[in-house]
Image (cartoon, grey):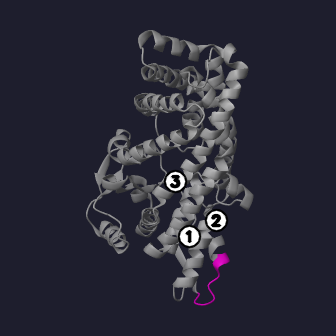
Amino acid sequence: MFEILASAAPGFDVEAATRAYLETLQGAARESSDAYFEGGYWLILFGAAAAVLVDWLILRFGLANRFRNLGERVFKRPFAITWLTALLYTLVGWVLSLPWSIYTGFVREKQYDLLDQSFGAWIGESLIALALGLAVMPLFIAVIYAVIRKSPRGWWAWGTGVVGLFLAVMLMVAPVFISPLFNTYTELEDGPLRERIVAMAAQYDVPADNIYVFDQSKQHKRISANVSGLGPTIRISLNDNLLERTSEEEIVAVMGHELGHYKLNHGLWRVTFMLTIIGLGLFVVSRAAPWLIRKYGDRWGVRDITDPASLPVLGIVLSVYFMLATPAFNNITRVQENEADAFGLEAAQEPDGFARAAMRLSEYRKIEAGPVEEFLFYTHPSGENRVRRSMQWKADNVPNAAMIVPEEGYLDPQ
């Protein structure tokens, strides 16, 4: 599959080796990759606009007011009233958002040949996600409003703590109770590949008792792996696409990267950094939402910020805030991905395997980007930067390094 060109000890050309990989993505494949990823930039804006529109419609037609009134007729306690209001809000919001969700999650993915599911299978999974949302979100929202009632001005600080606790619980339970609702997880079979992953994990004291394979090929062809969970639920997972579409060198390189996330405590740090941004967002809501309610509350039937009918008002402010905060969220993730890339290269010592894996991700990630574009929109380093990092590691660490030119067509889906 790969042709080794001249041996290049001290004279290994990092830039030439990088271009050799990048030039394997040409023509229609590159145009499709670029168009799909660049279209995602607009989805950030249009997605926020769609969310604001849904919340505005709920306010404009007095639905939030009716949800709250129904809650007051059924229940006496504020917590229960808020819970029912949030339940109806979540359900109606899902229905109103469905056309946008169908376009972004099904139609567009099909247009770019990135989804293998039928519409029936896709909507089935969407309904499972809705059921989970109806089970969890109304309770979470009811707790947030209890905090708001307790401290109408300073609730945002306590609310940030509630969000943090919620995220910690979700991180712990998701691998065991949520992920299996969408995919089947089985232990990676014994053999040389498992032994190599276990040995690499043991070298860095990463728990590797549980290594799972999940059947994501039923949804799409994208390669993926992760270290998920918290405490006793920590597990290493890789999808069947990674096993079936890539070489052992690529799999080991990807798993080295994922082990890096665990070893570098990225889960804890990511939650900490994201909570900082979320806390600022809740502070903005605590100031902007009361102003909107004073100005338009009578028209919407919203009394004050402690009124659960104000939920769409909070949603509008958060939608705009999170859209503007997208680069901050992206940079938190991308910095950690850079660190995991460096760790993975040292752990796996498979620079060409990592370069090939980075190239495969070009199916849905634009391979090259300018610095501003990458700063604003990329949650991971660009494929170009990842390949160049791999080739630089190779030049620095592999004696008599040789440049490898991938054969044409190796990126084609299998």
Spot occupied by residue 18 in the image (x, y as percentages of width and height): 63, 72
At horizontal 51% and vertical 40% (from top left) the residue drawn is 158
Which circle, 1 or 3, is nearer the viewer?
Answer: 3
Q: Quadrant of residue 55?
A: top right
Decide which of 161, 235 is in the foreground and name it. 161
At horizontal 61% and vertical 19% (from top left) the residue drawn is 58
- On the image, numbered disc 2 is attached to which residue? 384
Q: Secondary structure at mark 1?
A: strand
Distance of label 2 from label 3 (alpha carbons): 29 Å
Distance of label 1 from label 3 (alpha carbons): 41 Å
401 in relation to 126, above or below: below
Instruction: Say if mark 1 contacts mark 2, CB within 8 Å.
Output: no
Q: Is residue 93 visible?
A: yes
Q: Is residue 409 visible?
A: no
Is 157 left, or right, of 45 in this rendering? left
Identity of the residue furthest to the left in this view: 190
Spot occupied by residue 315 in the image (x, y as percentages of width and height): 60, 30
- On the image, numbered disc 1 is attached to which residue? 406
The amino acid pointed to by label 3 is Thr
Q: Which residues are magenta?
A: 8-16
Mark linked to residue 313? none
Of callouts 1 and 2, the N-terminal one: 2
Which circle, 2 or 3, is nearer the viewer?
Answer: 3
Mark linked to residue 272? 3
Q: Secondary structure at mark 3?
A: helix
374 in relation to 143, above or below: below
Q: Quadrant of residue 170?
A: top left
213 in relation to 299, above or below: below
Spot occupied by residue 301 in the image (x, y as percentages of width and height): 63, 14
Of callouts 1 and 3, the N-terminal one: 3
